């Protein structure tokens, strides 16, 4: 009986440890939690009836993949041409806002798919001739 009890106890400990190890660091979607500095990691597109594809290098030059997007608490958003310079313009600033789970940057709406301490995932929907294009942007947070 002692061996059975020990086995059950070990299994319970493994289950509890596994469950807590998988806890995600998701955050509530609030202005305070969105404020921060982000760098684009990937961009994918999904067209109705087709598989999702990675279009990061098709739409972004290597010098753009180290640029920073900074969301500030005063609702200004600044794009900084950090690292390898793409142009002579170092940065530009626009406004941003939050409406529920929709992040609006310079008038463009992005659905927030997920927000964590390390990652922000945005989704932009577009339609043309009854074809829906879903673009997903994944940002690393600093």
Image (cartoon, rainbow, N blue to C red):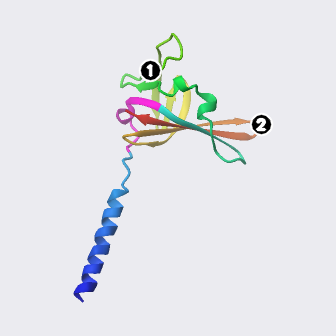
Q: Residue at x 54, y 37 (%)?
A: 42
Q: Residue at x 75, y 40 (%)?
A: 130
Q: Residue at x 45, y 25 (%)?
A: 69
Q: Position of residue 112 (x, y in %)?
A: 49, 39
- Give the quarter of the image for residue 126: top right
Q: Residue furthest bottom?
A: 1
The Cα atoms of the two marked residues, 2 and 1, are separated by 38 Å
Instruction: Name the one closer to the observer, 15 or 49.
Output: 15
Q: Position of residue 62 (x, y in %)?
A: 55, 26
Q: Position of residue 95 (x, y in %)?
A: 47, 21
Relative to 104, does residue 93 appear above or below in the rendering? Answer: above
Helix, strand or loop at disc 2?
loop
Helix, strand or loop at disc 1?
loop
Mark 1 — residue? 82
Instruction: Name the one closer to the observer, 117 or 54.
Output: 54
Mark 2–mark 1 CB contact (< 8 Å): no
Q: Quadrant of the C terminus?
A: top left
Q: Residue at x 64, y 45 (%)?
A: 52
**Residue 45 placement, left or right of 26:** right
Q: Which mark is residue 16?
A: none
Q: Nearer the viewer, mark 2 or mark 1?
A: 1
Relative to 69, does residue 124 appear above or below in the rendering? Answer: below
Relative to 73, does residue 11 appear above or below in the rendering? Answer: below
- In reply to whether residue 98 is colored magenta, the answer given is no
Q: Residue furthest right?
A: 129
- Give the quarter of the image for residue 119: top left
**Residue 113 placement, left or right of 130:** left
Name which of mark 2 and mark 1 comes first in the sequence. Answer: 1
Write down the region rendered in magenta: 27-39
Mark 2 — residue? 129
- In reply to whether residue 29 is colored magenta, the answer given is yes
**Residue 41 placement, left or right of 73:** right
């Amino acid at each position: 009986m002692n061996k059975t009890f020990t086995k059950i106890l070990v299994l319970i400990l493994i289950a509890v440890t596994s469950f807590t190890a998988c806890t995600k660091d998701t955050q509530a979607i609030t202005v305070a939690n969105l404020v921060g500095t982000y760098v684009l990691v990937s961009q994918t597109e999904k067209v109705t009836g087709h598989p999702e594809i990675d279009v990061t290098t098709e739409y972004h030059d290597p010098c753009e993949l180290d640029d920073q997007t900074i969301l500030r608490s005063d609702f200004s958003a600044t794009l900084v041409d950090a690292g390898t310079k793409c142009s002579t313009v170092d940065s530009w600033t626009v406004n941003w806002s939050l409406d529920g789970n929709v992040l609006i940057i310079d008038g463009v709406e992005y659905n927030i798919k997920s927000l964590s301490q390390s990652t922000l995932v945005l989704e932009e929907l577009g339609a043309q001739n009854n074809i829906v294009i879903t673009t997903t942007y994944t940002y690393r947070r600093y």
